[in-house]
Image: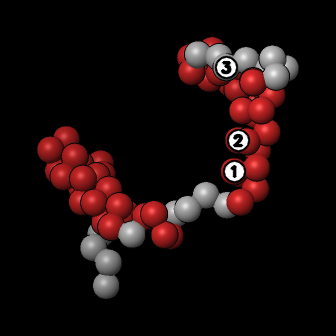
Amino acid sequence: MPATFEPGRMTIAEKLRAMEALWEDLCRDAEASLAPPAWHRRILEARAHAVRRGKDKPVEWETAKKRIRKAVS
């Protein structure tokens, strides 16, 4: 039976230990179970190609986040 998870009752140290334990567990076999799908690779390759051809350019992460927030709000 899974343990009860009550973050509101946990100290910061307990939360950090829980996050570390979860991260370690996820990383054990993440490469096989969390591999990105083939369509994602194709999109990344197309974007890299567009940058090489001068059709697109990379932006800073902060700028990208602002654009995303504006697009979804």
Left/right of residue 34 with respect to residue 17 in the rendered view? right
Q: Residue furthest front?
A: 53
Within 10 Å of disc 1 (Cα), the crowding (few <14, some 14-19, many 20+) is few
Where residue 43 sits: x, y (%)? 76, 44
Q: Residue furthest bottom?
A: 1
Q: Tag 2: residue type?
A: Leu
Screen quadrant of the N terminus: bottom left
Q: Tag 3: residue type?
A: Pro
Whether residue 22 is visible here, answered yes or no, is no
Q: Tag 1: residue type?
A: Arg
- Residue placed at 52% from the left, 63% from the top? 34
- Residue placed at 48% from the left, 69% from the top? 32
Within 10 Å of disc 2 (Cα), the crowding (few <14, some 14-19, many 20+) is few
Screen quadrant of the C terminus: top right
Q: Which residue is mark 1?
A: 41
Where residue 26 sits: x, y (%)? 37, 63
Going from N to C along the chain, the mark reached first, 3 or 1, is 1
The circle on residue 44 is 2
| Relative vertical location of residue 59 with respect to residue 29 in this rendering, above or below | above
Whether residue 34 is visible here, answered yes or no, is yes
Where residue 39 sits: x, y (%)? 76, 56
| Relative vertical location of residue 19 with respect to residue 65 in this rendering, above or below | below
Q: Quadrant of residue 56?
A: top right
Asked whether the residues under the numbered discs 1 and 2 touch, taking CB atoms below 8 Å apart as contact, a structural biologist would say yes
Q: Which residue is mark 3?
A: 58
Where residue 60 sits: x, y (%)? 58, 16
| Most foreground residue, 27 or 66 | 27
Q: Residue furthest right?
A: 55
